[in-house]
Image (cartoon, rainbow, N blue to C red):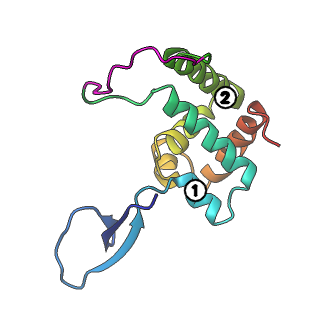
Amino acid sequence: MRQLAERELTSEGPRRAAGVRAKARSVTVNLAESPLAWLHARGHLDARLFDAGERLRADYERAQLAPRVTMRWDPVRGKSTGDTGLTPGERQIAAKARFDGALAAAGRGLEDVLWRVVCAGEALADAERALAWPARSGKLVLRLALDRVADFYRIA
């Protein structure tokens, strides 16, 4: 699941659109990589915390909590035979309940950094600026929040 893209580097950071080519430096970035995976790959998060973040993001996606910009074009499915599990609506409700429970287990004040970094895919530095936190404090707060989420999901 790699989506590689070339980004021109400027003094402000990577430029998203193709720009001026004079003395241009570029970098290849993986658009499919989450900020959580980036932190885990560099040793800032252990496997337990990474797994907790991925479980939280999976519940966020299953609960379909992301905003929609168009109508849904999913095909209408009839009743399947032999399926004794939950209906798609019940699975969505269960994922929403797990997501809400995980955020409640993280505690007030920590759910905002969890949502920004894990669910919305915002970079940790951008989340720190948006929350008006000191630089490099987000990593510690994110680790604390993910530890509580790992306890909620009972990840050993």
Locate residue 75: give its quadrant. Answer: top left
Q: Upstream in the sequence, badge 1 or badge 2?
A: 1
State whether residue 120 appears in this view: yes
Find out whether the residues at labels 1 and 2 contact each other: C-beta distance under 8 Å: no
**Would you name the residue on which mark 2 appears?**
102
The amino acid at mark 2 is Ala
In the image, residue 100 sits, relative to residue 106, either above or below, namely above
Question: Residue 116 in the image: x percent, y percent?
Answer: 50, 40
At 56% across and 38% down in the image, what residue appears?
Answer: 57
At 46% across and 41% down in the image, what residue appears?
Answer: 120
As helix, strand or loop, the secondary structure at mark 2 comes to: helix
Mark seen at residue 37: 1
At 45% across and 43% down in the image, what residue appears?
Answer: 130
Q: Which of 154 and 109 is in front in this view?
A: 154
Question: Few, some or many C-alpha atoms within 10 Å of disc 2 (few <14, some 14-19, many ≥20)?
Answer: many
State whether residue 12 appears in this view: no
Residue stretch in magenta: 71-83
Q: Is 52 inside the magenta-drawn segment?
A: no
Report the magenta stretch's main SS: loop
Residue lying furthest bottom: 23
Question: Residue 29 in the image: x percent, y percent?
Answer: 40, 67
CA distance for labels 1 and 2: 19 Å
In the image, residue 106 sits, relative to residue 7, either above or below, namely above
Q: Number of numbered discs present?
A: 2
In the image, residue 39 sits, relative to residue 18, either above or below, namely above
Q: Is 80 inside the magenta-drawn segment?
A: yes
Question: Residue 11 in the image: x percent, y percent?
Answer: 33, 72
The amino acid at mark 1 is Ala
At 50% across and 19% down in the image, what residue appears?
Answer: 88
As helix, strand or loop, the secondary structure at mark 1 comes to: helix
